[in-house]
Amino acid sequence: MATLFIADLHLSAHRPKIIALFLDFLRHRAARAEALYILGDLFEYWIGDDAAEQPENRPVVQGLRALTASGVPVFVLHGNRDFLLGRTFESLTGCRLLADPARIALYGEDVLLMHGDSLCTDDVDYQKFRRMVRDPEWQRQLLGKSLEEREQIARNVRELSQAAMTDKPPEIMDVNQAAVENVIRQHGVRHLIHGHTHRPAQHEFPLDGGTVRRTVLGDWYEQGSVLRCQDGLWTLESFASISKKL
């Protein structure tokens, strides 16, 4: 059986075909997996675990619960859109939240998992925003607001973020190579897997006398993207074009 890695699904009621594709992925491909890792931004935004029962979120929660109940472990990292995923989400879905970064043993190799946004150190404004929203006190105050207020705040932040991205050079929103090398050295691994940048690829480069690999997962805007690891083979796939599948 294979271990699967996905990221940046950005599930939203505004994109029902992607939700349908993800649920199909859980029922079929993931059901045959040894484990599934979701490396951030499962949702377009997550305004708190009390939103799990909202109609657009309920099928996803139930789909994840069905998968974990069948015996397939599912591990989730926070992304920059769903950093409020918490213990109730774990309880409802059977998933396990991991710290970012997370070092795992995968078929005899130590691998580092990250969402990837913390590596985009050239985007100074975003890093300031990231520190703010990851602050426990800021999160406590936000969760003290009503669901309706949080929903509006999330929409406003998303609109501001999209507007800001149009004015930034593309290279600023990509990872910083020095940051990549530093985190690989810090954790003593030769392989890093992350998402966030929506630039799926497998990069190899020399570091400290050896070769290391950085695998970037693709997003799920037009089709699914998955990294399949089995028997020493690491295959980054795109599958099921939405226009053809649904």
Image (cartoon, rainbow, N blue to C red):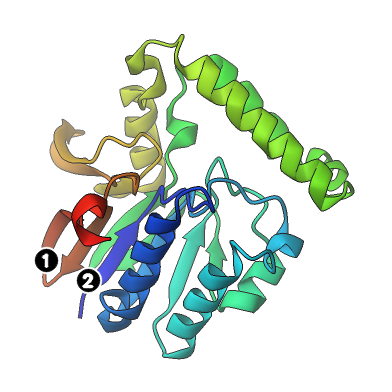
Q: Nearer the viewer, residue 178 or 120?
A: 120
Q: What residue did someone put label 2 on?
A: 107
Q: What residue did someone put label 1 on?
A: 232
Q: Is residue 90 left or right of residue 203?
A: right
Q: Which amino acid lies under the numbered mark 1 shown in the image of this protein?
A: Gly
- Determine the residue positioned at 51% across, 48% down: 14
Q: Are marks 2 and 1 in contact (CB under 8 Å)?
A: yes
Quadrant of the image occupied by residue 36: bottom left
Residue 33 in sight in this render? yes
The residue tagged with tag 2: helix, strand or loop?
A: loop
The residue tagged with tag 1: helix, strand or loop?
A: loop
Q: CA distance from mark 2 to mark 1?
A: 7 Å
Q: Residue 235 at x, y = what percent?
A: 13, 57
The C terminus lies in quadrant:
bottom left
Quadrant of the image occupied by residue 88: bottom right
Q: Residue 146 at x, y = what percent?
A: 87, 50
- Determine the residue positioned at 68% across, 29% down: 156
Give the label on residue 14, or none. none
